């Protein structure tokens, strides 16, 4: 019984640690936020909009690209709440930003 308990504890740690490491964002909650606050510039699937790229005279990389996905979660949250280059900050709570960051991970281009 005791070793069974210990096993359960270790298992829950193994399951919890990666969750905490990504900042606890909830991708399912982040999706509607992305659709309403980000998709106008980044497209429904984060692919980027040519018109926006032209308007800001920058390249808007697909959010699923290797370069964008290489950014750690903390940096994604910072880009969202503080802006980045030509992108203006988006008003979101820390939790909202973490949810959207988690959602961005689901956009990663699979190879
Ligand atoms: C008004 C248009 C606009 C909105 C709204 C917007 N962005 Fe952006 N975003 C940009 C532009 C333009 C860039 C490129 C900035 C640059 O390189 O100067 C960018 C860059 C980024 C990057 C960096 C990508 C890379 O190349 O590494 C991330 C991540 C990002 N946006 C996430 C978001 C998220 C998440 C939201 C919604 C919470 C959002 N953006 C809302 C215009 C926008």
Image (spheres, grey):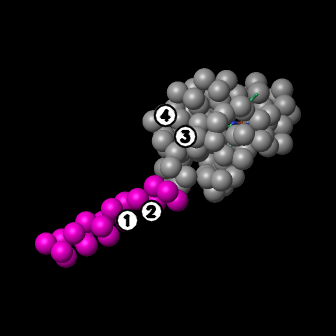
Of tags 1 and 3, which is closer to the observer? Answer: 1
Cα–Cα gap, marks 1 and 3: 22 Å
Report if residue 96 is visible in the image. Answer: yes
Of labels 4 and 2, earlier in sequence is 2
Secondary structure category for the residue under label 3: helix
- Provide the residue span drawn in magenta: 1-21
Q: Nearer the viewer, residue 110 or 28?
A: 28
Q: Is residue 55 above or below residue 25?
A: above
Q: Nearer the viewer, residue 38 or 19?
A: 19
Examine the residues drawn in magenta and state their main secondary structure: helix
Secondary structure category for the residue under label 2: helix
- Rendered location of residue 108, percent (x, y): 54, 47
Secondary structure category for the residue under label 1: helix
- Rendered location of residue 2, percent (x, y): 18, 75
From the image, tell me which residue sits under label 3: 99
**What is the number of the mark on residue 17?**
2
Cα–Cα gap, marks 4 and 2: 20 Å
Secondary structure category for the residue under label 4: helix
Within 8 Å: ligand 1 and the Cβ of disc 3? no
Residue 15 in magenta stretch: yes
């Amino acid at each position: 019984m005791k070793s069974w308990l210990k096993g359960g504890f270790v298992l829950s740690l193994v399951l919890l640690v990666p969750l905490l490491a990504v900042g606890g964002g909830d991708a399912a909650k982040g999706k509607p936020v992305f659709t309403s606050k980000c998709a106008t510039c980044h497209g429904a699937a984060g692919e980027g909009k040519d018109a926006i790229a032209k308007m800001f005279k920058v390249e808007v990389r697909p959010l699923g690209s290797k370069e964008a996905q290489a950014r750690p979660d903390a940096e994604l949250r910072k880009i969202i709440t503080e802006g980045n280059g030509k992108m203006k900050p988006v008003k979101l709570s820390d939790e909202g930003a973490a949810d959207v960051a988690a959602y961005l991970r689901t956009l990663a281009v699979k190879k």
